[in-house]
Amino acid sequence: MPVSLKCPNCGAGLTAPAGAARMTCEYCGNQINLQGPPSGQPPRPEARPQGQLLIPPQQASDAARRVVISLAVGMAVLGVVSSLVIFLVTRSITSSVESAVGAANPGVAVPAIPGFGENSGIPGLAADQFPLWDSVGGQPIPAEIGGKAAFLGRIRVMPSDELYFLLGDAQSGAVLQRLGPYGTYNDGYRHTHAAIAGTRAAISDFQAKLHLVDLESGAEAKVLDLSDRAELVCAAADGSTFWIRQVDKRELLVDPKGGELREGERPEGCVDATEEAWPLIPSGPQRKALARVDKKIDGFESERILEEGELRVAAGHKHPGTAIPQAVGLDRDDGLRWRVDVPTIDPMRARERSNEHDALAAGRYVTIYGEGSKAWHVTAIDAATGDRLWDVPLRVIFAVDSIDGVVATDRHVFVTRTSSLEILDATSGALLATIGRESYED
């Protein structure tokens, strides 16, 4: 009767003809000896001269050809499927965003920007163009223009992927000025920075130029030639000067009005929009400050300390154990004033250590936390007492959704998401506007 066995060379399952002494593997061409060793002895592998080709050349060529064809067909099918998915998602985003936003937030004025139905509030963009908020360019920069609260931030205009800056009304999200373009994202994502001093903006580009722009009119006042691309651009806290650090490590002070350049050190309170006050790896003094707090407060591990006047808040999590997001109020000697769990939901449903971004302004400590696998909340706490002021869930986005930053003023909270910016009322948490292209789950 036929005997089932495996080829000792390629492992293929075979059926040997009854009574046969040898057979050839139909998959790899190996010659198999079917005359087994005497009972009780293990089979011995067939000796082959070193370098012996187990597969006849013609069979090897045919096999290789089949592999190449299979790979080519597979890649082609994958490409078609990927293109179809992208097309369908893009169509869905374009057609559904406006109605979804209105349904989820009745009465909320959504800024008229490409990607939100037929509205187009950004001047100069064609009907097939749309913006993505670009957090790689830093957090939104609050400003006061014409007596109104405003903000400046970087966007990518697709499909050309050009970099612009938008000046927007913080209360409504309406676009006040569109500045640029300043090259493509690939050209300038590392070297296109902005800062505000009074009503002047300084914007660097990948061609080693610095553009001084009047924000009230949107007109370019001056274009300065630098000796290298900019690495950082910021403004002194009093708005008296811009400061630039170039890739060649030169440090320059720039007069906002006249544009005069001179060598100079970084002014006090001069922070580039891309810089974190508390980086992922804190500085030596920052680590010492955190260690002092952790030593005084049991069951808490601090990650950042925010200060505003006499108010101090440490952000961190429960430790040891489940890393529930927590915040503590501190006095000037790191003594405990108050301590709260950041989530208002069941703390065990909150994502561990998800309070990654926060801000302290006008006595309000504003931070975020995650719920489940996808949802996000923004919450505000009285920095003096620890009392909860408000807690609002952000709308769930049908996309990869991360929170890249939180900026707060006395009137507004700016939350940077994957490709959009949400503006909330600082006193209530109510959504005021959304900038950028996104879609929402039902």
Image (tube, rainbow, N blue to C red):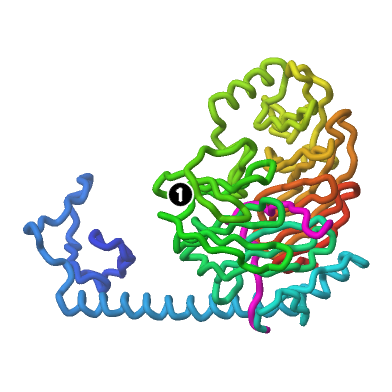
Residue at left offset 62%, top offset 20%: 291
Q: Nearer the viewer, residue 88 or 366?
A: 366
Q: Quadrant of the N terminus?
A: bottom left
* Vertical relation: 92 (above or below) 234: below
Tell me if I can see residue 135 in this picture: no
Q: Secondary structure at mark 1?
A: strand
Tell me: 99 left or right of 161: right
Crowd band around label 1 with a 10 angstrom C-alpha radius: few (<14), some (14–19), many (20+): some
Residue 151 vs residue 435, the one in the foreground:
151
Q: Residue at x 60, y 27 (%)?
A: 286
Give the quadrant of residue 282: top right
Residue 413: x and y in percent read 79, 50
Point 61% across, 41% down: residue:
270
- In this rendering, the count of numbered labels is 1
Q: Is residue 163 visible?
A: yes
Q: Looking at the picture, how far across and down is residue 254, in whole percent?
A: 55, 50
- As rendered, which of 251 and 92 lies closer to the eye? 251
The span shown in magenta is 127-147
In the displayed structure image, the side of residue 209 where residue 24 appears, left or right: left
Residue 133 drawn in magenta: yes
Instruction: Name the residue that disc number 1 marks.
Output: 246
Task: Give 370 or 288, whichever is nearer the viewer.
Answer: 288
24 vs 409, left or right, is left
Residue at 83% over, 54% down: 424
- Name the spot of residue 183 as percent of width and height, x first: 51, 69
Residue flagged by tag 1: what amino acid is it?
A: Gln
Query: The C terminus is located in which quarter?
Result: bottom right
Please state the horizontal and vertical placement of residue 92, each as a whole percent of the image: 71, 77
Magenta-drawn stretch contains 158: no
